[in-house]
Image (cartoon, helix red, strand yellow):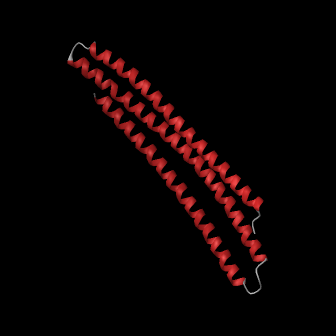
Amino acid sequence: MLTVDQVMASHKANMETLLGLTSKAFEGVEKIVELNMTASKAAMAEAGDHAKAILSVKDAQELLALQSSMFQPLAEKTAAYSRHLYEIASSSTAEFTKTVEGQAADMQKKITGLVDAAAKNAPAGSETAVAMFKSAVSAANNALESVQKAVKQATDVAETNFNNAASTAMNATKAVAKKR
């Protein structure tokens, strides 16, 4: 049976975890806001420079050359922005995952301890019920581990696909820029 001190300690640990996760979430949001501000400032400056360059164009061929010279740097900046945004999201997700996995492992230990304590104090003749309960807890632990592995694999596949898509887009942009 849980004591009042154990319940209070559990609530305190849960509150600390919640506050830690909230702090990590705000850090991620701050990084995204900072990234967007930096990107917006750079885009505004580049738009001004481009407008000035367009106003100084003498003929259509010079205008076409100016326009085509913008494609590759724009694609590279867009890819860099996407990569940075993805890194922020991945980092935040990794922090959440690490915390949740730690909490799950701690909870598994506590449940196993409770089951073991209950089994020791179980009345005679309840061995079958205790064995079934232990089996259910073990199955739940195995299912949780399987889900964690599946999420990790899905995350790895998503990261690989993102990197491949970014690389393909950059190569295609470079090829188009070279043709012009």
User: In the shown orientation, is residue 163 left or right of residue 21?
Assistant: left
Estimate the x, y position of residue 126 in percent, counting from the top left: 72, 84
At horizontal 49% and vertical 47% (from top left) the residue drawn is: 159
Question: Looking at the picture, does residue 90 appear above or below residue 48?
Answer: below
User: In the shown orientation, is residue 123 left or right of residue 36?
Assistant: right
Locate the C terminus by quadrant: top left
Estimate the x, y position of residue 97 in percent, counting from the top left: 59, 51
Locate the N terminus by quadrant: bottom right
At horizontal 67% and vertical 64% (from top left) the residue drawn is: 108
Estimate the x, y position of residue 86 in percent, counting from the top left: 48, 41
Question: Looking at the picture, does residue 155 appear above or below residue 131?
Answer: above
User: In the shown orientation, is residue 157 left or right of residue 111?
Assistant: left
Estimate the x, y position of residue 124 in percent, counting from the top left: 77, 85
Question: Looking at the picture, does residue 124 appear above or below residue 152?
Answer: below
Q: Nearer the viewer, residue 151 or 26?
A: 26
At horizontal 60% and vertical 63% (from top left) the residue drawn is: 145
Outermost residue toward the bottom? 125
